[in-house]
Each structure stands twice: as structure tokens, then as C-alpha cells.
Amino acid sequence: MHWKRRETEQSIAEVLHSTAAMTIDTNHDESTTPTVPPRVATLSSRVTPVLSEPQIEHLQALASATRPRLLKAAAEDFASSGESVFAHYVAPILQERRTALLRSGTTDINHFKTASQLWPILPDEEHVFWDEVIAQQLRLSLKHKSLSYDECVKYAGKIEDVPTCLFHAEAAVCRYLGVDGPDPPPPDLAATADPVTYAMAVVIDAVEPGAAGEVLTNFGFPGVARPQAEQEQEDEGEGDDEDWDWDWDGLDTSRPRFECTRDMMYRPLTRFTLDDVRQAEGRSQTMMLRHLSHRFDTIGRELFFYYVVPRLCKQSTPPRHSNNVVGLAREIWAGLIEREKETWLAANAMFTGELDKGDVHGLVFLELGSLDGKVTSLHDMAETAVKLHDAKKVKET
């Protein structure tokens, strides 16, 4: 890459150490336990693992080569459908609520349905939540290795999704039993956010205080001049990849080529624009910021795609060396050297870290037209990656 980092290899190690500190610590000690807002404080704090204690003990007694295979099977079976995840969360809540209701003496009705029998009577929007928001995202996370099989089994999915799953599970049980359920979302949040946004009710500090601001500084982002945007013909672009499960086709490439607008966002996020996020206040804004953060992976690849895909759409349609835009973007990412991937990882850590903290300044990373030094440097990196890939293809031919 033609721009130079100010730090040596030792600095890289230090930055990676800082980045490692940005991962969620799952040790349940007092210093790392997430703060639970009062609205969900009444929910059960115990995470029910996918495997029971006897099953876990049996698994631990097996050969080390066998355990990963069985863990993989258990995690994939759990995430195979929304009904599977729903039944897992609902079963203990249903038993607890039903027992408490009978003991209260307020009713003699024996609510006999099991968790699986509640699934067909759920409202359509709840089916969408469990099938698409939870189960589908779990499968994608497992597929792209942003969630390990062990964590999926241990926490019954993603640990940050547990409070939301418990909320929806308890709401379903309360509807069935005819009792008061947990508080609904605040009206302002419900009007602007989808279930995933509402899922961000528990603050999980993914970044050590003060650490995020040092990441790009340590990597030496110099704030170089923004690369000149080529004046090419504004053709219609394609961003679809049938083999890619993320909503990369949600990038709005129907606009004039590389006009760098806020519309270049994931499809699930178009319900609230960057201006909407900035104008929101308090908890609503915080939930939106965390929702945006959780649309990106932890390794920087999706942030790389966010900058590269619009550039590839502008470059040519169809791309010169691939059948589709996202396929070419994946090919370019695979060709990056480890040092370049580490730089994207560090940028991603700073970006998602600021959003997770509720810092609205993190939105600058999503403003492709911004002249902020961090954004122009990422544009420069993306342009360099594309040019090096093109040069490599020409050399091979």
C-alpha cells in the first residue's frame, strides 16, 4: 500500500492487543457483567445452554477430536429454525409461569400446551422475529465464523441476543396464559426501530474505556487527500451474489455512480437514515447506533465491502474479473495480505466500538462522502486494493 503507517511491527502488536481488549468478556465476575436496564431487569438472568449438564459432561468425556463435531451438530440443530430457538427459550419460562399461576389460586385452568404447541399460534411478526432476526442471523454467524459453535451452545445463541429472546419468549407465554407480560418498547423507539434494534436493550461494553480512540491513531491513519473520483459512465450496477447470504444487494447502487450518499447502506437499515439517527435522542439513538454496529462482523471484512462494493459498481458492470460485484469484492479481500486485513480490523474495531458506546461520531465511518481523515484513508485503502487486484489479474493474463 502506498500510504505509510507510522508504527513499526511492535506497534502493530500493541494495537492488536488493544483490539483484543475490545472483545466481549464472558467471565461472569462483577467487573464484566453487563448492566441490565430496569426495563428488562425482571427477566431471568440465567442463560439455559443448548445442551443439558449430563450432555455436557458426556461431551467433555469424549475424545478431543469428537467434541468439535458434536458441538457443531448441536449448534446447527439449535439454529436450524426459528421454532427450535423459540421452543428452547419458551419451555422454562412456560413451566415457571404456569406453576406460579396455578399456585396463586387465581385460576384452575390447566394450560397444557407445550412450547412447541405455542409456535403455530404466534402472530406473524413474532414468526418473522424468531425465523429471520434470530435463527437466520445465527446461521449466518456460524457460517462466517463470527460466532463459535461453543458459544452458540453455551449461550443459546449470541450472548447479546439473550435478553431480547427472553423478552419475546416471556411475552409469548404471557399472551397464552392471559397474564401481564413485560413492558413493551417505548413508543418513540417502536416507531423507528425493528426488533433487532429493540434487541440492543442490554449494554455490553465491547471496547475498553478510552481504547477505541487509539486504534486508528496507532495504525497511523494520516488523513490523506481523498482519491479523485473517476468520471465514468453512470451505468446501472448489480450488487447481488446468490451465494452470499448478507443483504449486500441492499446497497443502493441505482443512484449515480459513487455519489457517496447515505443511501449506500444495508437494506435492513434503510428504515432509518443517518440523519434519523442523529436527530433521535436518548435511548432511541443509542439503540439505533448499536443496531448499526451489529450489522458488521468483527474482522473488518464487511467494512471493507462497504467501501469497496460501490467502487466496483462504478468501475464496470459486470466487473471485469468476476460474475458479480460481491463475488469480486470477496476475491479482493481474499487477496489482501495479513497486514492490510489487520488495518481493516482495527478500523472496524474503532467504528463498532464507538457505536456500541452510543457515540454518534462513529457514524462518520458510514458517510462515504465525508472528508474526515479516517474516511478518506479507508477510501484510499479500498482504491489501492482494487488497483492491486486489477494489476495482478493483468499480470496473470
Image (cartoon, rainbow, N blue to C red):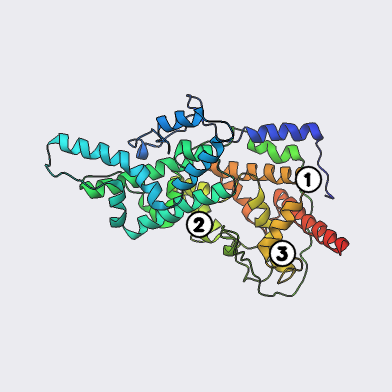
Estimate the spatial distance between the alpha carbons at disc 1 and disc 3, rounded to whole Å.
25 Å
Q: Residue at x 66, y 36 (%)?
A: 19
Residue 149 screen position, x and y as percent: 53, 40
Instruction: Please report whichever mark, 3 or 2, sits nearer to the chain's N-terminal start.
Output: 2
Asked where in the image residue 211 lies, by quadrant, the reply is top right
Q: Label 2: which residue?
A: 276
Estimate the spatial distance between the alpha carbons at disc 3 and disc 2, rounded to whole Å.
28 Å
Mark 3, secondary structure of its residue:
helix
Q: Amino acid at mark 2?
A: Asp
Residue 274 screen position, x and y as percent: 55, 56
Categorize mark 1 by other alpha carbons within 10 Å: few (<14), some (14-19), many (20+): some
Instruction: Please report whichever mark, 1 or 3, sits nearer to the chain's N-terminal start.
Output: 1
| Relative side of 303 to 166, left or right | right
| Relative side of 111 to 140, left or right | left
Q: Label 1: which residue?
A: 222
Q: Quadrant of the C terminus?
A: bottom right
Categorize mark 3 by other alpha carbons within 10 Å: few (<14), some (14-19), many (20+): many
Asked where in the image residue 181 lies, by quadrant, the reply is top left
| Dot label at residue 312 | 3
Residue 116 screen position, x and y as percent: 31, 49
